[in-house]
Amino acid sequence: MNSSPTDVLISEVGPRDGLQSIKTVMSTSDKQKWIDALYKAGVSEIEVASFVPPKLLPQMADAAEVVRYAKTLTGLTVMALVPNLKGAIAAIEAGVHKLTIPVSASAAHSMANVRKTREEMVDEVRQIVQYRNDWAPLVKVEAGISTAFGCTLQGLVSEDEVIWLAEAVTTAGADESGLSDTTGYANPVQIKRLFKRLKEAIGNKAGAAHLHNTRGLGLANCLAAYEVGVTSFDSSLGGLGGCPYAPGASGNVVTEDLVFMFEAMGIKTGINLDLLFQAREPLQSGVPHETLYGMVPEAGVPKGFEAATK
Ligand code: ZN
């Protein structure tokens, strides 16, 4: 793993967000091989699992085992998604470094997704923080505001409500709060406006951009976020997961393309692109029927690219 300072943090969410939205169950040993390959490429933070009942998501039944394995990789920040206190307790017991709690800005999505109002989710965050303070004070807690840019159920999501919620979860004790374009509705102007407001509202607790490429604006939106000071980005190797609707377009932003964009601009990610491409092999062999996306892995890097960045 690369330990020299980087300009941006690329947080790989494939083993959680990617696997969670496909049918094939990847074996624990295949997950380990994939995580190993990402780590070797220089990825320094990976969301490796979600702690939800195995009945709901058989794909994540081995969450604790995967966390324990990932923790053997020195220097890697091991993250897991937890929807509630019960999940948080299990994740902390498994030894995660960081928890991420999805909190929906859309009232309709919140009810549909977790059967809780937004206020009840803020209360859940408060309870998780309390538990963390008592039992694992070093574990970081992030509350990601999902459907921050629009919602398939209710359409428009009020920007005032997104900011209100980010303030509420950080007041409840979350260390940071980022914004997720869960539905791929965002455009760069909206991204800049909302991330600026987020920073004004919660200062250095403003967290990661979790953006989707559903309508082809994933990279443009990441760049827009970077231009207003966001330095932490979620993406998925091969664009796995994140509910792709259109053929040829991934759901999650493709890690390989995102790393290429930043590196080509001289913005350091700490990730070796060749090794990152190689990490597609264990992913593809673990889920042989899934399509992997990515423009740069398809086309290759431009001639002279390496020389230009050294
Ligand atoms: Zn996603």
Image (spheres, rainbow, N blue to C red):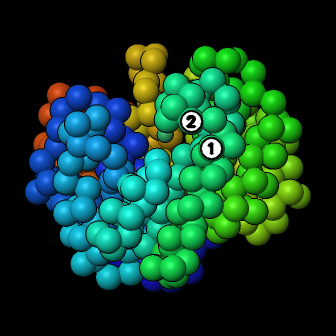
Q: Mark 2 points at which residue?
A: 116
Amino acid carrying mark 2 in the image: Lys
| Left or right of residue 217, residue 225 in this image | right
In the rendered image, residue 153, in percent from the top left (x then y), is placed at 61, 17
The residue under the point 67% across, 30% down is 106
User: Is residue 199 found left or right of 170 in the rendered image?
Assistant: right
Q: Residue at x 23, y 36 (%)?
A: 55
Q: Does residue 13 appear anywhere in the picture?
A: yes
Residue 166 relative to residue 245: left or right: right
Q: How far apart are marks 1 and 2 (CA)?
A: 6 Å
Q: Position of residue 276 (x, y in %)?
A: 34, 57
Q: Which of 4 and 144 lies nearest the eye of the viewer?
A: 144
Local crowd at mark 2 within 10 Å, few (<14), some, or many (≥20)?
some
Looking at the picture, tell me which residue is in the foreground, 124 or 249: 124
Q: Which mark is residue 261?
A: none
Tell me: 236 left or right of 72: right
* Camera-nearest residue between 62 and 257: 62
Mark 1 secondary-structure assignment: helix
Q: In which quarter of the image is the N terminus?
A: bottom left
Ligand 1 neighbours mark 1 (CB distance < 8 Å): no
Above or below: residue 36 compared with residue 286: below
Q: Residues within 10 Å of mark 1 (few under 14, many from 20)?
A: few
| Residue 266 in view in this figure | no
What residue is shown at x 29% (from left), y 31% (from top)? 22
- Check if mark 1's residue and mark 2's residue have beta carbons within 8 Å: yes
| Residue 171 sits in quarter | bottom right
Q: Tag 1: residue type?
A: Glu
Identify the element where label 2 is drawn: loop
In the picture shown, does residue 278 fall above or below 77?
above
Q: Residue 15, how many percent across, how many down?
A: 32, 50
Percent of width and height locating residue 235: 48, 48
Which disc is residue 120 wearing? 1
